[in-house]
Image (cartoon, coloured by chain):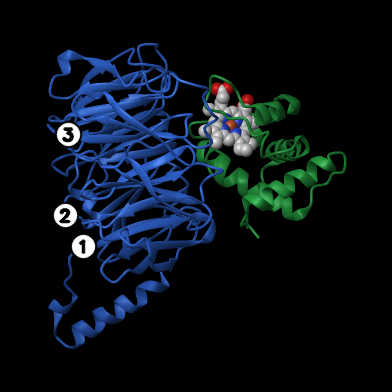
Amino acid sequence: MRILTTAGMMIGIAFSSAFADTPPLHPQRQSELIHLVRQDCGSCHGMELRGGLGPALTPQTLKDKPASSLVSTILHGRPGTPMPPWKNFLSESEADWIVDNLQKGFPDAR
Amino acid sequence: MRARIPLLLVLALGVLSGCANSNLRGTGDLGVVIERATGSVQVLDTTHRTSLARVDGLGDLSHASISYSRDARYAYVFGRDGGLTKVDLLTQRIDRRIIQGGNSIGGAISADGKLVAVANYEPGGVKVFDADTLALVADIPAIGSDGTRSKVVGLVDAPGQRFVFSLFEAGEIWVADMRDPKRPALRKFTGVGREPYDGMITSDGRHYAAGLFGEDGVALLDLWNLDAGVRRALVEFGRHGEKLPVYKMPHLEGWAATGSQIVLPAVGKHEVIIADQNSWKEVARIPVAGQVVFAVARPGGREVWLNFAFPNNDTVQVVDLPSRRIVQTLTPGKGVLHLEFSPRGEQVWLSLRDENRVEIYDPDSFARIGTLPVESPSGIFFTVRAHRTGL
């Protein structure tokens, strides 16, 4: 199920922030995040995450960067650059999950 | 591939009946939609509102755009993986395909139709190819006055066999005169503003405008008078209030130039700005549903249709220019990525990425008049673009 509704997302966020300490993420939410990263992050980073206006988000480029700073980049953006903050759409544990998977090699949508 | 079988059948029948002429057709009502996730395109027919065929094997099309050959038979597809593919709309096959760079973002075809230029992010520069053979003709590395390579954005063709483009990091606009194709004559304008992120040319071919991400306003170049240099326009715009985050960069290619007025998406503001096309002064701004990605004028120029960045990418709004009001808000589905009018504007086609379909609307009644299954559709490009300067 790749289709993601804003309402569904909001519920997902409410749910996951309420249970921030209880990984792993629900499989449904994981597939929503895969869709979000490939499609919406992909508009700047490339659907294959090999870079575009934003840098490549591949294991090679990210492996030596501290996960915590990448998580904070995702949640708060980088002021003065086009990288926007995602904290209204992603909880900290979801950003953690994204960074973990980016560093491992991001899963495909299908 | 499978969709080509009917055509082959038609061809075979045509040959059998000895009636070769029955296969002839024009391309003026055709177009192409990108299937971004599967590296394929579908060939569209706006008269019968159908898809004629799917063509596969075009690589990573996650940010693809298209230019058309002068005869509107071939679509040059610029892929994100640096692929340049020439698709024949009549045989519905790939005519030629090369990998020309690492990461391209768009291209343009010269006024005489002989040269196809591709803008590359990686390595930053412009490559120019022979439109027939796709052989490399010229390579223009985008090394700015800062000595480093920049991403190239906003590549357009301009009258006088020229290409114009912007350097994102260096903040420059370059004009390449291609009259001697192997030796492009470059005119470089430096310090035009921080981070030009896209560019457009007005339909009369006179003004090139680059939108700036790093500061307010647009960098404007009068191509009739290069000696006057680049000036800043619309600076007052964006000076008020807080900038909102931008979840997708606006595209300026669709900047709706309607003849006397031009409609631009604001960056970091949920507004469109209406400017006078001669003075480049703001005449109005209109609050809209989100960060605008494309502002597309309906042929005739009375209305402008808008789509939006995440999280408002399920919405389309229509601005009526005489009254400067939003006259319609549609929510056709999730992930509205692009919209394209038929040449005379009696249909508008919308790609709904997350719904895996393309929808066709009547722009007068706003009724849905067709829907086609398309896998993760993005850009829709009709052949009318073959005859427009800048594309």
Q: Is residue B375 above or below residue B176?
A: below
Which sits earlier in the primary sequence, circle 2 or circle 1? 1
Residue beneath the point at 73% across and 51% down: A29
Q: Position of residue B52 (x, y in %)?
A: 33, 69
Q: Colour of chain B?
A: blue
Q: CA distance from mark 3 to mark 1?
A: 25 Å
Q: CA distance from mark 2 to mark 3?
A: 20 Å
Disc 3 marks a residue whose amino acid type is: Gly
Disc 2 marks a residue whose amino acid type is: Asp
Q: Is residue B178 left or right of residue B45?
A: left
- Residue contact at pointers 2 and 1, CB within 8 angstroms: yes
Which sits earlier in the primary sequence, circle 2 or circle 3? 2
Chain letter for the residue marked with disc 3 in the picture: B
Of badges 3 and 1, the one in the foreground is: 3
Q: Is residue B195 left or right of residue A96?
A: left
* Tag shown at residue B71: 2
Q: Are marks 3 and 1 on the same chain?
A: yes
Chain letter for the residue marked with disc 1 in the picture: B
> Which residue bears the numbered disc 3?
B205
Residue beneath the point at 53% across and 36% down: B247
In this rendering, the count of numbered labels is 3
Q: Position of residue B203 (x, y in %)?
A: 19, 38
